[in-house]
Amino acid sequence: MKHELKLYCEKSSLSELRVFLSTILTKSGLSEIIQNQLILAVEEVCSNLIIHSHDCNPKSFILLAVNFTTNSVIFEITDSGKAFNIIEYKSPDINAVVKEKRKGGLGILLVRKIMDKIEFETDSTHNTCRLIKKIKSK
Amino acid sequence: MLEINKSADQDHILIELIGEVDASNSVELDDAIKEALSVPTKKILVDGNALEYISSAGLGVFMSYLEDFQEKEVAFIIFGLNEKVMNVFHILGLDQLIEIKKNQNEAMKALYEA
């Protein structure tokens, strides 16, 4: 089953995103901790795009599709802003974050720790980021 | 939605977080900690009993003050985190960098009996 959401690029959309994901994941049979992790990982990617690729422009949007397969759940995030290549992005060292009193940089690290597989593709018009989490088949 | 209540008690400042911290409101958390650090206190407590969610934006706020806490010799303790929120701190190993206690009693003990 596939679920889709169109998310406008403002920070206030993030709570709407959480409600959308929570509604879908509640029915998944996954533990609350895993559900929260998945919501977090998707939100981190979306908020990155909203803030850095779209400068919080409420007229632009990103698309999210959630797809359950027999042994995984796939979150596909598509946008047409400045491409953010999540695979090439180097997460900072946590100790450096503390030393430099940085407030950002932890988001993508969380995504990497939570998800089993991350894919990124870009062409002249669209960027697609796929976050894949393996789940036990029922 | 995030609500932040601040109070001062004995020797410490208590910051209560109610709701969800994300990129849209982490600046409010930042202001609350900045304000707590602006008064001459040596003890700051964060009550996370009603904190339902935190994203990296909120975690980043805590992380960005760890050096200041150390420089100013401020004891900073978070307590009452639910399992989901605690798990997020744990994923990044932040529970090793920030003092986290189960409940207010334990946090107070650490503050006043140490």
Image (cartoon, helix red, strand yellow):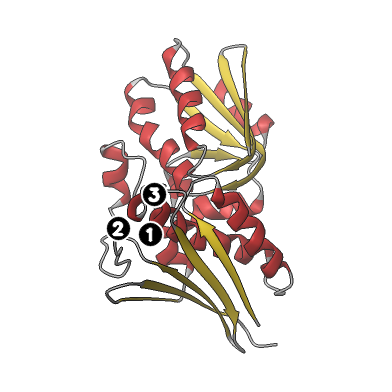
Q: Residue at x 70, y 74 (%)?
A: A28
Quadrant of the rendering where the N terminus of chain B is positioned: top right
Which subunit holds the residue at mark 2?
A
Comes first in the chain, label 2 or label 3: 3
The residue to which callout 3 is attached is A51
Question: Which residue is at 38% across, 21% downward?
Answer: B73
Q: Identify whether A58 is placed above or below A68.
A: above
- Which residue is tagged 2? A91
Q: The residue under label 1 is which amino acid type?
A: Leu
Percent of width and height locating residue A32:
68, 63
Task: Give whichever of discs 3 and 1 has the lower sequence position.
Answer: 3
Where does the image place residue A119, in percent across and percent down from the top left?
A: 37, 77
Q: What distance separates the C-alpha of mark 2 from that of mark 3? A: 17 Å
Please state the chain letter of the residue tagged with numbered disc 1 in the rendered image: A
Distance from the alpha carbon under mark 3 to that under mark 1: 17 Å
Pointer 2 or 1: first along the chain: 2
Tell me the chain of label 3: A
User: Is B34 above or below relative to A76?
Assistant: above
Which mark is nearer the camera, 2 or 3? 3
